[in-house]
Amino acid sequence: MRKRKQRPTDGGGNWMDTYGDMVTLLLTFFVMLYAMSSLDVAKWEVFVRSIFPNRQEILEDQVSVNTPIGVEVSDPRGTPEIPEEIVRTDMDSLYLTIAEKMNEIGIDGVTISRGDDYTFIEFQDRTFFDGDSSVLTEQGKNTLEVFCDAVSPAKDLLSQVNIMAHTAQGDPEHPNNPRTDRMLSAMRAAEVCIFIQTRESIQPDKLVNISYGQFRPIDTNETREGRARNRRVEILMIDEGASVRSLNEYYEEYSSGKNADRTVVTTGQPMDTGHGFAPAEPDQDGVSASMSPLKNSAEKGPAENETPSGGAAGTMAE
């Protein structure tokens, strides 16, 4: 009988042990890297805030998930340094968000312009107030509610918000009574400012109300329509981290047409009938008339009859 050949005993399958050890070491290495890594709290806060604007408790719970044991993390309720590129993206889309929400409730004629580091909004007079009144209309309250809802998620990205109110010159031949003129525009700006503050959509220390009176018209006071345009409320929102310039600089920059490609006028039509925006129409000089003060508007001719107040001291503001 033939003898069976003996199998080699040189351990030919032992390479599996070496391979298994190497895989185990690699796995251990990557687990250590993962354990040593930390979450970028600032970026995570911006991300969560964009989805849940008022959910601070969600932010606190989620930040602690991947925090290594024994490592201190700064209080997420503070104000982390937000990357500039993230701020720019959010603020550049805010003006379109506001316009969309205005269209959804049928508000037309609102001009919204995005500059390099600011957003400028012009509301027509009929949106907020009746003539010679500083009491917000129901339409004005609804419009401000929409504005507050749109701006609230981005309130930490704003450094200052100016509310500027204007009146119209009732009689082009005579200036308005100074007391009536200034008080009316001041009360209009204050009413808008108070409404925004009570909704807690913007921090109170960032709100500034400004009274211009009759002295920054954007149309003639000769017609009722022109005076309606001059009686307006404007909101200037300045980005966080931006240098605050004089108001004249903001007016002049807009009037130059620099922001024309990022300026829209709401049509009051929902999105399913088109984009819902109208381009800002330039005036005869090639730039938008909005925000561009007209000089000597009283020289354009007599206005419709208005009720005088104060005799020679001036007429009643509108």
Image (cartoon, rainbow, N blue to C red):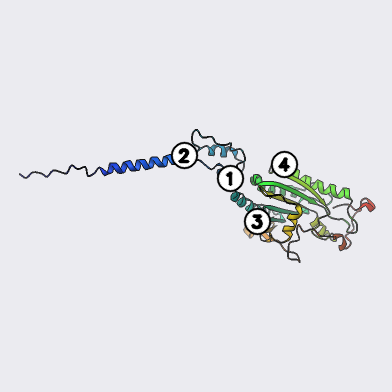
Q: Which residue is mark 2?
A: 36
Mark 3 and mark 2 residues within 8 Å of each other at the beta carbon: no
Q: Give the residue type that dot 1 points to.
A: Val
Residue 187 visible in the shown view? yes
Ranked by sequence position, the earlier of labels 4 and 2 is 2
265 with respect to 178 (left or right):
left
178 with respect to 112 (left or right):
right
Q: Which mark is residue 270?
A: 3
Is 109 in front, or is 71? 71
In terms of secondary structure, where does tag 3 sit? loop
Q: Which residue is mark 1?
A: 46
Q: Give the residue type that dot 4 points to.
A: Asp
What is the total number of numbered labels drawn onto the structure image? Answer: 4
Q: Is residue 315 above or below residue 42?
A: below
Q: Give the residue type that dot 3 points to.
A: Pro
In terms of secondary structure, where does tag 2 sit? helix
